[in-house]
Amino acid sequence: MPLNTKPNIKDPDGYYAELIAAHQGLSDDDSMALNARLVLLLMNHIGDREVLSEALAAAKK
Amino acid sequence: MLQDRYTLAFKLYPYERSRDQDAAAPVRHPVVVMGGGPIGVATALDLGLQGIPVVVLDDHEGIGMGSRAICFAKRCLEIADRYGCGEPMLDKGVVWNVGKVFHDDRQVYEFNLLPEAGHKYPAFINLQQPYFEKFIVDRVREAQANGAPIELRGKNRVDSVEVKDDHVVLHITTPEGPYTLEADWLIGCDGASSPLRGMMGLDFDGRVFEDNFLIADIKMKADFPTERWFWFEPYFKSGASTLLHKQPDGVWRIDFQIGWNIDRKKELQEENIRARLDAMLGPDVEYEMVWNSIYTFQCRRMKKFRHGRVLFAGDAAHQVSPFGARGANSGMQDVDNLGWKLGMVIRGEAPDHLLDSYHEERAYGADENILNSTRATDFITPKSKMSHIFRNAVLDLAEAHEFARPLVNSGRLSVPCTYDGLSLNGADMLTGGPARTRVGSPCPDAPLGDGFLLGRLGGSFQILTIDADAPEVVEDEGITATRVALSASDDATGALAARYLGDAKGAVYLIRPDQHVAARWDSADAETIRAAMRKACGKD
């Protein structure tokens, strides 16, 4: 299954706001650590190595 | 003692001595409106057209200078149309559909409002606020000539109020000295810094956004198209964000986000504004400066829009950031909501607590507007390093990846809210009925021969039938609903059927005086309709 880059979550403003709110009040270091944990959790959830490699490539561009 | 706080664009209601100033005892009026801005004057127009006497008090003699609110949305224009002043707005306004979003020097996103056919009014027009206000006042003058009991009193400043259980006492200053008035009902339309709210010691809590925006209205001959252009972190470095938008009379609105710690006076010097404009427009574009201002904003609302005999509307009740054009547009929806309810309560047709639903419905609308404009503001002016990093990541991804485009938020443009699940709503029992006309929705327009559906709706309760039978008239304790009988074949384009029938063969809608859907059914008899009318009037 290729990387899905079409809109895939309902209420885009809502989930973006939740993401930003999760960082509220954190130091830069704590924010980076939160992002790292989040990426690892989501990678595990996705589970598909090919998709993950594709996502890494898209993000690196 | 009555000094103007601003310069006028149009002097429309010069001070005149009123007989009330010579009365031996304070004169009592059914309704007094505090504030002669667009929301106050529209409130007076709504009530005056119902034959209810209303006095508007303003501490100036007309409309202030400056384009201010420039973006007027479809629903707001439809409300103005019901009052008889929508068409001059449309004639004067600039219609636009395309918006472009840039980051630095790249276009990351383009949207088209793709106006749906079969509406009298477009999604948006741009129009300088003084014109918008003037068209409402012009309509008041016309209505007055036809007997509408409206008075606009300029240079009447309310200095204090005494709020009683069944009326309000107002102490007023004029150029010829003070006088006192009484009002059965007082409507506070006196703007974001509402003196009335202050006099009553009422709260106005919410978020302050630490940023300043510089507005430069300029006249220029340049070949920018009639589109909304928004830059995040523009390459020309004139602001952290910049908005370019066209107004009538060859005027362009440019907004620069210039940060929190600024020297206001210095930033407003012409040479400094020109430096920002020159960087943006290039050295060869000639322009003339029309109006400048620096503004900050907050997102907040009053806890209660109703305090006994005092009701608040527009910016006095709720304030949003400008992103999304949800200020004046939502204020007009307040007027639309309040007018018929107050009219019925004053005429004794509905119980006093119908006015509690004004707060319920419009606070619901205000919360939706505050949520949307707060999110847009957080995206446009990120408040932390990480928020900024995410914002720019979205902008980086949006060009190549479709999923990121709906996240780009330069303002979610004003649409009216549907009063889902609120207490005036009746039955939603139209099998296969479209979601957009569910109970609580504002009626979408549709073509009808040479005219439009909304021209046939509003001002009183109506029973809209489409290929369905229903009583011609249903009455309940002084309130009458009359039938508007239509057939899907009345609109050859099919829009009427698509918007009101969906998969249904026929439909009966009960429409409120503000053109919102009160109830709908496959079919309905007089008893069923009467029950929904009672609910919509707060009787059950």
Image (tube, coloured by chain):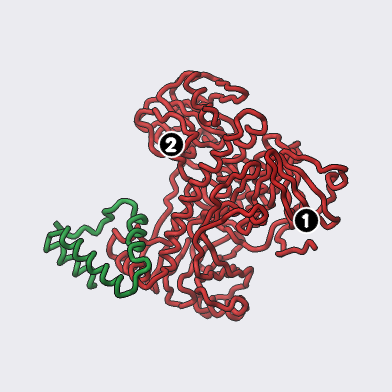
Chain colours: A green, B red
Q: In this view, does B286 lie above or below B76?
A: below
Find numbered disc 2 in the image and state the secondary structure of the residue it sits on.
Answer: helix
Pointer 2 indicates a residue of which chain?
B
User: Residue placed at 45% from the left, 43% from the top?
Assistant: B117
Mark on residue B155? 1
Instruction: In this rendered view, identify the residue nearer to me: B76 or B381.
Output: B381
| Residue, far left | A49
User: Which numbered circle lies on residue B437?
Assistant: 2
- Which residue type carries mark 2? Thr
Residue B31, which numbered label?
none
- The structure residue drawn at horizontal position 84% and vertical position 42%, both measured from the top left corner, is B25
Would residue A44 be found to the left or right of residue B31 on screen?
left
Q: Is residue B130 above or below residue B458?
A: below
Q: Residues within 10 Å of mark 2 (few under 14, many from 20)?
A: many
- Look at label 1 and name its amino acid: Lys
Q: Which of marks 1 and 2 is nearer the N terminus?
A: 1
Q: Nearer the viewer, residue B11 or B110?
A: B11
Write the residue at 73% across / 53% down: B160
Q: In this view, does B476 lie above or below B512?
A: above
Residue B232 sits in which quadrant? bottom left
Q: In this view, does B187 lie to the left or right of B429?
A: right
Give x and y (percent) for residue A48: 12, 60
Where on the picture, by quarter, is residue B82? top right
Residue B174 position, x and y percent, is 81, 55
Residue B448: x percent and y percent?
A: 50, 33
Residue B143 appears anywhere in the view: no
